[in-house]
Image: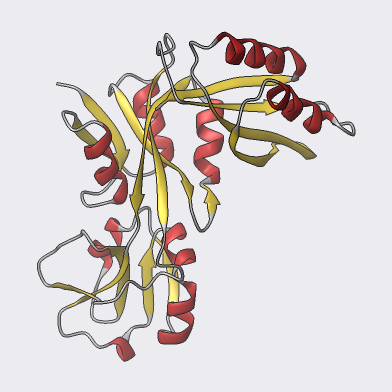
Amino acid sequence: MIKVSCLGPAGSYSELAASELCPEGERLLCRNFHEVIESLVNELCDYAVLPIENSIQGGVVVNLDLVSSYSVFAIKETVLKIDHRLAMLRGVKREDITQVYSHEQAIGQCQTFLREQLPGAKCRYADSTAESLSLLDEHTAGIVGAHVRAEGVVLSDENIANEKCNFTRFMLLERRGDLPARSSKVYFSAVTGHVPGTLVELLGIFARSNINLTRIESRPLPGKFGCYSFFIELSGDVADQNLIDALRAARDYCEHFRLIGVYD
């Protein structure tokens, strides 16, 4: 049977994304994102699912670093609406809450509610939103997805996120192999020379080829303060010679170039 690794435990948004991206796959639930990727690289599974970008907090930086460091390749993506709810054991009152557990991203996305409604509660990071359910007692709460259900746990009626229009992009990854024959999007990382105009020139390669860039973000290069790796997504079919030529020109221009994904 096909296996797909994702961040656990059961009920996490990553598991929900895995069920959409690879519905026929048996889920291998991992404790953290590094374990998700290592399970794929070490051939313990056939695919892996990682969140890459959130509409509020931007790129999931640890995963940008992972996909650019390991020999993996994105072949598919999905976008999930994120609906955060406050979870407490049945009978617990909000005024009794002293600690709130959840994944770092979820806590960051609910700061307004936590500051206004639970000002005295300390935030504690868990490996996933779903894991916070296992940490609940009479003085704690968790931040979980609205799709999560557990015996004895009550979810808030309202979405507690700062921004209700909240989406996360997930990618389905496989071990690096042959490129898909067709695509509508291409994703790559690039490091240019650290001199004026180099990023402009890189972007100009695609502008002159009339290729639309749909996303660009940067990450600091380890050990090189002030130098950055750029993560760029563009619209295009890898079967199109115009796109092939532009990618080849970009590869030749950059100090480092890595194709991360080709997908619809």
- Residue pictured at 40% horizontal, 10% vertical: 181
Q: Is residue 169 visible?
A: yes
- Residue 43: % across, % down: 32, 19
Pick the quarter of the image with the N terminus: top left
- Residue pictured at 51% horizontal, 33% vertical: 66
Q: Is residue 119 visible?
A: no
- Above or below for 2 versus 93: above
- Residue 148: % across, % down: 20, 60
Most extreme residue toward the bottom is: 95
Pick the quarter of the image with the C terminus: top left
Most extreme residue toward the front is: 210
- Above or below for 31 versus 249: below
Give the color scheme: rainbow, by chain, secondary structure or one colour: secondary structure
Horizontal arrangement in the rendering, residue 180 relative to residue 202 (left or right): left
Horizontal arrangement in the rendering, residue 104 relative to residue 129 (left or right): right
The front one of 81 and 6 is: 81
Quadrant for residue 92, please give it.
bottom left
The front one of 182 and 180 is: 182
- Residue 34: % across, % down: 43, 37
Number of numbered discs overlaid on the protein picture: 0
Horizontal arrangement in the rendering, residue 136 relative to residue 160 (left or right): left
- Residue pictured at 50% horizontal, 15% vertical: 238
- Residue 165: % across, % down: 41, 62
- Above or below for 47 versus 168: above
- Residue pictured at 89% horizontal, 31% vertical: 195
Most extreme residue toward the right is: 196
Quadrant for residue 20, please give it.
top left
The front one of 137 and 102 is: 102
